[in-house]
Image (cartoon, rainbow, N blue to C red):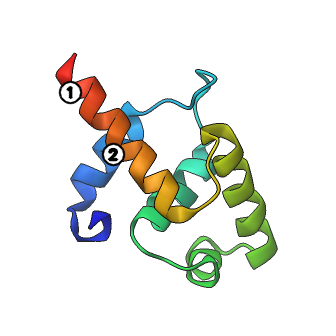
Amino acid sequence: AYSTMEEKQQDKIISSTKVLDSDFLTEREQEVLRLILGGKTNKAIAAELFISENTVKTHVKNIYSKYNVSSRAEIISTLLKNQILEQSL
């Protein structure tokens, strides 16, 4: 569902969402998250960002930790829920 959204919508979700401890993601984590939300695999993310797959895994692990989630599906769900809550305020 998320991967069919326009990139502008994806960027809006990412930029309007803070992690649970009120810290923002690093710039690289935001790039990785944007690609995850676009449906890319770790291997595809590594190729696109010119980094190793292990580095991608580290960024993914850090993102999951900051959002207190354990899967791609859960991170997407969390981001979408946060966006809905922010829009209703």
With respect to residue 41, does 35 lie above or below?
A: above
- Residue 40 showing in the rendered view: yes
Res 26 quadrant in image? top right
The location of residue 84, given as percent across then percent down, is 25, 35
Residue visible at 56% across and 83% down?
44
Vertical side of 79 occupied by 48: above or below: below
Foreground residue among 18 and 28: 18
> Under tag 2, what secondary structure?
helix
Horizontal side of 35 relative to 4 (left or right) equals right
> Residue 47 placed where, x, y %?
61, 82
Q: Residue at the location (63% across, 77% down)?
A: 42
Of 80 and 38, nearer the camera is 80
The circle on residue 41 is: none
Q: Position of residue 63 (x, y in %)?
A: 64, 48
Amino acid type, callout 2: Leu
| Mark 1 neighbour class, 10 Å CA radius: few under 14, some 14 to 19, many 20 or more | few
- Reading the image, the residue beneath label 1 is 87
Residue 46 left/right relative to 41: right
List the single residue furthest toward the top. 89
Question: What residue sits right under mark 2 in the picture?
Answer: 80
Q: Residues within 10 Å of mark 2 (few under 14, many from 20)?
A: some
Which quarter of the figure has residue 32? bottom right
* Vertical order, 8 against 18 (above or below): below
Q: Nearer the viewer, residue 30 or 22?
A: 22
Q: Secondary structure at mark 1?
A: helix
Mark 1 belongs to which amino acid?
Gln
Q: 46 or 69: which is nearer to us?
A: 69
Q: Quadrant of the C terminus?
A: top left
